[in-house]
Amino acid sequence: MEIRDKIINSAMDLFLKYGLKNVTMDEVAASIGISKRTIYENFSNKKELLAASVDRMIQTHIEYEEEMKSKTSNIIEEIFITMMNMDEHFQSRIKVGMDMKKYYPDIFEAKIGTQYERAYEKMKVALERGVEQGIISPDTNFDFAVFLIMETIYNILSRPEILIIKKISVIEAFRYIIIYFFRGISTDKGIAIMDEKIAEMKNRK
């Protein structure tokens, strides 16, 4: 692995673990046993390193999505296998995104903003595919449905204090939102698949 990739991977891990503001270039260098000078030979400043780390996170997520899609036969299975494979880093990724919006809004808009549009179109296409599979109601208003789910997720997950008050984790909140949303737009066939997947999730606990 090239040194640039090692630096990006180390920074990404540290950002997820400690947050954007708490990670210094010295700590990134120490984590992989190189000098800070070596980091600055590859990245002019922390902001540039953050941008590269975000690109890596996005690419990793896209590859993960494609892998999950290849293992499923319909949109509901795809959604549920993703939910069942959420790990402890999910909440950290959400926090990194919120920190980025607060402290590095230009990077947030350039990187995450474009991903919002990508996710919007991807979800819309997935719902249309669900209609063809007989699991999503053909009466669904796709534009509004996608707007509703994405805005709900964004508003809930961007206000962690609400989740603390309600004594629910970010992962649990995400799962509730997804389950209730898809129940509302699924056919009887889709709901049957959901019930089967929900039972699998419970059995894994």
Image (cartoon, helix red, strand yellow):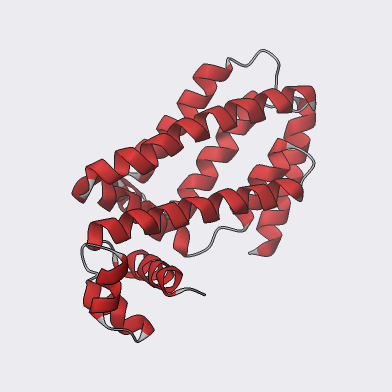
Q: Please tell me whether residue 117 is drawn above or below residue 163 in the rendered image.
A: above
Residue 6 found in image quarter: bottom left
Using the image as rendered, state which of residue 108 and residue 153 is in the foreground.
Answer: 108
In the rendering, at what x and y percent does residue 122 appear?
A: 58, 32
Q: Position of residue 42 (x, y in %)?
A: 32, 67
Count up the numbered dots.
Answer: 0
Nearer the observer, 161 or 97: 97
> In terms of depth relative to the viewer, which is nearer, 101 or 109?
109
- Pick the quarter of the image with the C terminus: bottom right
Relative to 92, residue 119 above or below: above
Residue 1 in view in this figure = yes
In the image, 88: left or right of 136?
A: left
Q: Residue at x 29, y 73 (%)?
A: 39
Image: 116 above or below 13: above
On the image, the x and y values in percent for residue 183 come to 64, 31
Q: Is residue 52 left or right of residue 145?
A: left
Q: Position of residue 139 (x, y in %)?
A: 66, 12
Residue 156 visible in this rendered orientation of the protein:
no
> For the view shown, which residue lies furthest in the bottom direction?
33
Viewer-nearest residue: 1 or 140? 1
Q: Residue furthest front?
A: 41
Residue positioned 58% across, 19% down in the render: 142
* Residue drawn at (33%, 39%) of the image: 110
Quarter of the image for residue 74 reads: top right
Residue shown at the point (26%, 61%) measured from the top left = 20
